[in-house]
Image (cartoon, grey):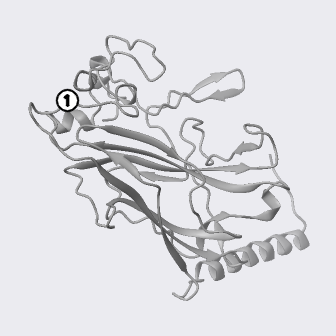
Protein backbone atom coordinates (compact mmCIF):
# COMPACT_ATOMS: atom_id res chain seq x y z
CA UNK A 1 0.00 0.00 0.00
CA UNK A 2 1.33 3.45 -0.93
CA UNK A 3 0.28 6.53 1.01
CA UNK A 4 0.61 9.89 -0.72
CA UNK A 5 1.02 13.15 1.19
CA UNK A 6 0.80 16.68 -0.10
CA UNK A 7 3.81 18.87 0.65
CA UNK A 8 1.90 20.65 3.46
CA UNK A 9 1.01 17.28 5.01
CA UNK A 10 4.66 16.23 4.93
CA UNK A 11 5.67 19.43 6.75
CA UNK A 12 2.96 18.86 9.36
CA UNK A 13 4.03 15.23 9.89
CA UNK A 14 7.69 16.24 10.25
CA UNK A 15 6.73 18.97 12.73
CA UNK A 16 4.69 16.53 14.83
CA UNK A 17 7.57 14.02 14.88
CA UNK A 18 10.09 16.69 15.91
CA UNK A 19 7.72 18.01 18.61
CA UNK A 20 7.14 14.49 19.98
CA UNK A 21 10.88 13.78 20.12
CA UNK A 22 11.51 17.13 21.83
CA UNK A 23 8.87 16.43 24.49
CA UNK A 24 10.28 12.93 25.10
CA UNK A 25 13.84 14.27 25.45
CA UNK A 26 12.68 16.91 27.93
CA UNK A 27 10.87 14.25 29.95
CA UNK A 28 13.86 11.92 29.92
CA UNK A 29 16.00 14.76 31.26
CA UNK A 30 13.62 15.22 34.19
CA UNK A 31 15.04 14.10 37.51
CA UNK A 32 13.82 14.49 41.07
CA UNK A 33 15.71 15.91 44.02
CA UNK A 34 15.89 14.13 47.35
CA UNK A 35 13.29 16.58 48.66
CA UNK A 36 10.79 15.48 46.02
CA UNK A 37 11.25 11.73 46.54
CA UNK A 38 9.35 10.61 49.62
CA UNK A 39 10.09 7.42 51.53
CA UNK A 40 8.31 5.39 54.19
CA UNK A 41 9.05 2.10 55.89
CA UNK A 42 6.23 -0.14 57.10
CA UNK A 43 6.05 -3.25 59.27
CA UNK A 44 3.62 -6.08 58.57
CA UNK A 45 1.60 -7.77 61.25
CA UNK A 46 3.37 -10.39 63.36
CA UNK A 47 3.97 -13.84 61.86
CA UNK A 48 4.62 -16.73 64.27
CA UNK A 49 7.31 -19.29 63.39
CA UNK A 50 8.72 -22.46 64.91
CA UNK A 51 11.42 -24.89 63.69
CA UNK A 52 10.44 -26.60 60.43
CA UNK A 53 7.16 -24.72 60.06
CA UNK A 54 5.96 -23.29 56.74
CA UNK A 55 3.87 -20.13 57.12
CA UNK A 56 1.92 -18.83 54.14
CA UNK A 57 -0.30 -15.85 54.92
CA UNK A 58 -2.28 -13.23 53.04
CA UNK A 59 -1.92 -9.89 54.84
CA UNK A 60 -4.88 -7.66 53.95
CA UNK A 61 -5.22 -3.87 53.95
CA UNK A 62 -1.52 -3.28 54.55
CA UNK A 63 -0.18 0.25 54.90
CA UNK A 64 0.65 2.03 51.65
CA UNK A 65 1.26 5.65 50.56
CA UNK A 66 -1.91 7.55 49.60
CA UNK A 67 -2.76 10.02 46.86
CA UNK A 68 -2.02 10.30 43.14
CA UNK A 69 1.59 9.16 43.17
CA UNK A 70 4.34 7.48 41.18
CA UNK A 71 6.12 4.56 42.86
CA UNK A 72 9.89 4.63 42.33
CA UNK A 73 10.97 1.74 44.54
CA UNK A 74 9.49 -1.12 46.61
CA UNK A 75 11.82 -3.32 48.70
CA UNK A 76 11.16 -5.81 51.50
CA UNK A 77 12.95 -8.14 53.93
CA UNK A 78 12.28 -10.25 57.02
CA UNK A 79 13.11 -8.86 60.46
CA UNK A 80 12.63 -10.01 64.05
CA UNK A 81 10.63 -8.15 66.70
CA UNK A 82 13.61 -5.89 67.42
CA UNK A 83 13.89 -4.92 63.75
CA UNK A 84 17.02 -6.98 63.15
CA UNK A 85 17.45 -8.60 59.74
CA UNK A 86 17.01 -12.38 59.82
CA UNK A 87 19.51 -14.84 58.35
CA UNK A 88 18.22 -16.76 55.32
CA UNK A 89 20.14 -19.72 56.70
CA UNK A 90 17.49 -20.09 59.41
CA UNK A 91 14.45 -18.24 58.07
CA UNK A 92 13.86 -18.70 54.36
CA UNK A 93 11.74 -16.05 52.65
CA UNK A 94 10.25 -18.15 49.87
CA UNK A 95 8.37 -15.18 48.41
CA UNK A 96 6.46 -12.00 49.04
CA UNK A 97 4.03 -10.50 46.52
CA UNK A 98 2.22 -7.14 46.55
CA UNK A 99 -1.24 -7.46 44.94
CA UNK A 100 -3.57 -4.54 44.16
CA UNK A 101 -7.37 -4.39 44.17
CA UNK A 102 -10.13 -1.80 44.45
CA UNK A 103 -12.48 -2.03 47.42
CA UNK A 104 -15.84 -0.47 48.29
CA UNK A 105 -16.60 -0.97 51.98
CA UNK A 106 -20.20 0.22 51.53
CA UNK A 107 -21.06 -2.88 49.52
CA UNK A 108 -21.72 -6.36 51.01
CA UNK A 109 -18.66 -8.42 51.74
CA UNK A 110 -17.37 -10.11 48.59
CA UNK A 111 -19.25 -7.79 46.23
CA UNK A 112 -17.25 -4.59 46.60
CA UNK A 113 -13.89 -5.89 45.35
CA UNK A 114 -12.45 -5.32 41.86
CA UNK A 115 -9.15 -7.11 41.08
CA UNK A 116 -6.48 -4.86 39.54
CA UNK A 117 -3.72 -7.20 38.31
CA UNK A 118 -0.61 -6.10 36.46
CA UNK A 119 -0.68 -5.70 32.67
CA UNK A 120 0.78 -9.14 31.93
CA UNK A 121 -1.16 -12.06 30.42
CA UNK A 122 -0.98 -14.31 33.50
CA UNK A 123 -4.12 -14.32 35.64
CA UNK A 124 -2.29 -16.57 38.14
CA UNK A 125 0.46 -13.95 38.60
CA UNK A 126 -1.39 -10.69 39.42
CA UNK A 127 1.24 -8.96 41.59
CA UNK A 128 3.00 -5.66 40.87
CA UNK A 129 6.06 -6.24 43.03
CA UNK A 130 7.49 -9.38 44.58
CA UNK A 131 10.60 -11.45 45.04
CA UNK A 132 11.94 -14.33 47.07
CA UNK A 133 15.11 -15.05 48.99
CA UNK A 134 17.00 -12.58 46.79
CA UNK A 135 14.97 -9.66 48.25
CA UNK A 136 17.71 -8.37 50.53
CA UNK A 137 20.23 -6.36 48.54
CA UNK A 138 18.24 -6.40 45.30
CA UNK A 139 17.31 -2.91 44.13
CA UNK A 140 13.99 -2.11 42.48
CA UNK A 141 14.74 1.49 41.54
CA UNK A 142 12.82 2.88 38.56
CA UNK A 143 14.88 5.60 36.81
CA UNK A 144 13.54 9.10 36.20
CA UNK A 145 11.19 10.15 34.72
CA UNK A 146 9.47 6.74 34.92
CA UNK A 147 7.23 5.50 37.75
CA UNK A 148 4.32 3.16 38.43
CA UNK A 149 1.25 5.39 38.56
CA UNK A 150 -1.20 4.80 41.41
CA UNK A 151 -4.15 6.65 42.88
CA UNK A 152 -5.32 8.30 39.68
CA UNK A 153 -8.87 9.46 40.59
CA UNK A 154 -9.96 9.21 36.94
CA UNK A 155 -9.25 5.45 37.00
CA UNK A 156 -10.92 4.64 40.33
CA UNK A 157 -14.73 4.24 40.36
CA UNK A 158 -16.70 6.40 42.79
CA UNK A 159 -16.86 4.86 46.25
CA UNK A 160 -13.83 2.66 45.73
CA UNK A 161 -10.26 2.95 46.97
CA UNK A 162 -7.01 1.15 46.24
CA UNK A 163 -6.06 -1.56 48.71
CA UNK A 164 -3.02 -3.84 48.86
CA UNK A 165 -2.54 -7.45 49.95
CA UNK A 166 0.83 -9.00 50.78
CA UNK A 167 1.12 -12.69 49.91
CA UNK A 168 3.94 -14.06 52.09
CA UNK A 169 5.54 -17.48 52.44
CA UNK A 170 8.25 -18.22 55.01
CA UNK A 171 9.94 -21.50 55.94
CA UNK A 172 11.71 -21.80 59.30
CA UNK A 173 14.69 -24.08 58.59
CA UNK A 174 16.12 -24.27 62.11
CA UNK A 175 16.92 -27.89 62.96
CA UNK A 176 15.48 -29.47 59.80
CA UNK A 177 16.93 -32.67 58.33
CA UNK A 178 17.37 -31.27 54.82
CA UNK A 179 17.38 -27.48 54.39
CA UNK A 180 17.57 -27.57 50.61
CA UNK A 181 14.73 -30.08 50.41
CA UNK A 182 12.58 -28.06 52.81
CA UNK A 183 12.89 -24.80 50.86
CA UNK A 184 12.18 -26.77 47.64
CA UNK A 185 8.97 -28.04 49.28
CA UNK A 186 9.70 -31.74 48.74
CA UNK A 187 6.59 -33.70 49.65
CA UNK A 188 8.35 -36.55 51.47
CA UNK A 189 9.96 -34.09 53.90
CA UNK A 190 6.58 -32.51 54.72
CA UNK A 191 4.81 -35.89 54.85
CA UNK A 192 2.12 -34.49 52.55
CA UNK A 193 0.04 -36.60 50.16
CA UNK A 194 -2.90 -34.20 49.63
CA UNK A 195 -3.05 -30.54 48.62
CA UNK A 196 -4.52 -27.76 50.78
CA UNK A 197 -8.03 -28.62 49.52
CA UNK A 198 -7.64 -32.29 50.44
CA UNK A 199 -7.20 -33.53 46.87
CA UNK A 200 -4.71 -36.45 46.58
CA UNK A 201 -1.49 -35.48 44.81
CA UNK A 202 -0.37 -37.20 41.61
CA UNK A 203 2.31 -39.86 42.26
CA UNK A 204 4.73 -37.94 40.00
CA UNK A 205 4.33 -34.77 42.05
CA UNK A 206 7.49 -34.75 44.17
CA UNK A 207 7.55 -31.15 45.38
CA UNK A 208 6.07 -27.67 45.07
CA UNK A 209 3.45 -25.38 46.59
CA UNK A 210 0.99 -28.25 46.97
CA UNK A 211 3.27 -29.79 49.61
CA UNK A 212 4.19 -26.75 51.71
CA UNK A 213 1.07 -24.71 52.32
CA UNK A 214 0.32 -22.84 55.54
CA UNK A 215 1.14 -24.73 58.77
CA UNK A 216 2.81 -27.71 57.10
CA UNK A 217 5.84 -29.05 58.96
CA UNK A 218 9.20 -30.06 57.49
CA UNK A 219 11.01 -32.97 59.17
CA UNK A 220 13.31 -32.04 62.04
CA UNK A 221 16.49 -33.71 63.21
CA UNK A 222 15.76 -36.20 65.93
CA UNK A 223 15.64 -34.59 69.35
CA UNK A 224 15.83 -30.99 68.06
CA UNK A 225 13.80 -28.39 69.94
CA UNK A 226 13.75 -24.67 69.31
CA UNK A 227 11.70 -21.72 70.57
CA UNK A 228 8.82 -20.10 68.74
CA UNK A 229 9.57 -16.61 67.44
CA UNK A 230 7.80 -13.70 65.80
CA UNK A 231 8.89 -12.08 62.54
CA UNK A 232 7.67 -9.23 60.35
CA UNK A 233 7.98 -8.30 56.70
CA UNK A 234 9.54 -4.84 56.66
CA UNK A 235 8.97 -3.00 53.41
CA UNK A 236 10.17 0.37 52.20
CA UNK A 237 8.43 2.36 49.46
CA UNK A 238 9.75 5.45 47.67
CA UNK A 239 7.47 7.66 45.61
CA UNK A 240 6.87 11.11 44.12
CA UNK A 241 3.72 13.14 43.72
CA UNK A 242 2.36 12.56 40.22
CA UNK A 243 2.82 15.40 37.72
CA UNK A 244 3.02 16.04 33.98
CA UNK A 245 6.76 15.30 33.91
CA UNK A 246 6.41 11.62 34.74
CA UNK A 247 5.99 8.73 32.33
CA UNK A 248 3.86 5.87 33.65
CA UNK A 249 5.27 2.38 33.23
CA UNK A 250 3.23 -0.79 32.93
CA UNK A 251 4.11 -3.91 34.90
CA UNK A 252 4.22 -7.28 33.12
CA UNK A 253 4.78 -10.55 35.01
CA UNK A 254 5.45 -13.47 32.65
CA UNK A 255 5.72 -17.25 33.06
CA UNK A 256 8.60 -18.90 31.20
CA UNK A 257 6.63 -22.19 31.10
CA UNK A 258 3.50 -20.57 29.66
CA UNK A 259 2.12 -22.83 26.93
CA UNK A 260 0.26 -20.31 24.77
CA UNK A 261 -2.50 -21.76 22.56
CA UNK A 262 -5.10 -20.27 20.25
CA UNK A 263 -8.84 -20.86 20.50
CA UNK A 264 -9.97 -19.42 17.20
CA UNK A 265 -8.88 -15.79 17.27
CA UNK A 266 -8.49 -15.82 21.06
CA UNK A 267 -5.05 -16.28 22.64
CA UNK A 268 -5.17 -18.50 25.75
CA UNK A 269 -2.36 -18.43 28.33
CA UNK A 270 -1.64 -21.32 30.69
CA UNK A 271 0.47 -19.58 33.31
CA UNK A 272 1.35 -21.47 36.49
CA UNK A 273 2.64 -20.53 39.91
CA UNK A 274 4.96 -23.55 39.85
CA UNK A 275 5.64 -26.24 37.26
CA UNK A 276 6.17 -29.99 37.60
CA UNK A 277 9.20 -30.80 35.44
CA UNK A 278 9.35 -34.41 34.25
CA UNK A 279 12.50 -36.19 33.10
CA UNK A 280 11.35 -35.67 29.52
CA UNK A 281 11.01 -31.91 30.16
CA UNK A 282 14.49 -31.70 31.62
CA UNK A 283 15.97 -33.35 28.53
CA UNK A 284 14.00 -31.05 26.22
CA UNK A 285 15.63 -27.89 24.87
CA UNK A 286 12.39 -26.04 25.57
CA UNK A 287 12.71 -26.56 29.31
CA UNK A 288 14.11 -23.57 31.18
CA UNK A 289 15.83 -24.46 34.45
Q: Secondary structure at mark 1?
A: loop
Residue 90 x %, y %: 21, 49
The picture quadrant where one finds residue 213 is top left
The quadrant of the picture occupied by the C terminus is: top left
Q: Nearer the viewer, residue 246 or 47?
A: 47
Quadrant holding the N terminus: top right
Is residue 102 depicted above or below 201 in this figure? Answer: below
Is 243 on the left or on the right of 50, as rendered? right
Tally of marks: 1
Across and down, in percent, residue 249 comes to 61, 62
**Image-quadrant location for residue 282:** top left
Crowding around mark 1 (Cα neighbors within 10 Å: few <14, some 14 to 19, many 20+) is many
Measured from the top left, where is residue 263 in percent x and y?
67, 20
Reply above or below: 73 against 282. below
255, 33: nearer the viewer: 33
Of all residues shown, which one is farthest toward the left? 223
Residue 185 x, y percent position in the rendering: 29, 31
Residue, disc 1 = 219
Residue 34 lies left or right of residue 135; in this view the side is right
Q: Is residue 21 left or right of residue 41?
A: right
Amino acid sequence: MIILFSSSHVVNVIFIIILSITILVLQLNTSYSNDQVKSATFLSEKLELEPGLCVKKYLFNVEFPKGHIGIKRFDAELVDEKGKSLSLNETYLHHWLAVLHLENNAKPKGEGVIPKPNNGPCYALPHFWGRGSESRGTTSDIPDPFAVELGNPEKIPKGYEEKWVLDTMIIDTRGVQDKHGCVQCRCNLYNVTKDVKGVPLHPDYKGGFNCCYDNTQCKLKEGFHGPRRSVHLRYTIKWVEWDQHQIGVKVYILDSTDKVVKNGSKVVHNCKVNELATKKDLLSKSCLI
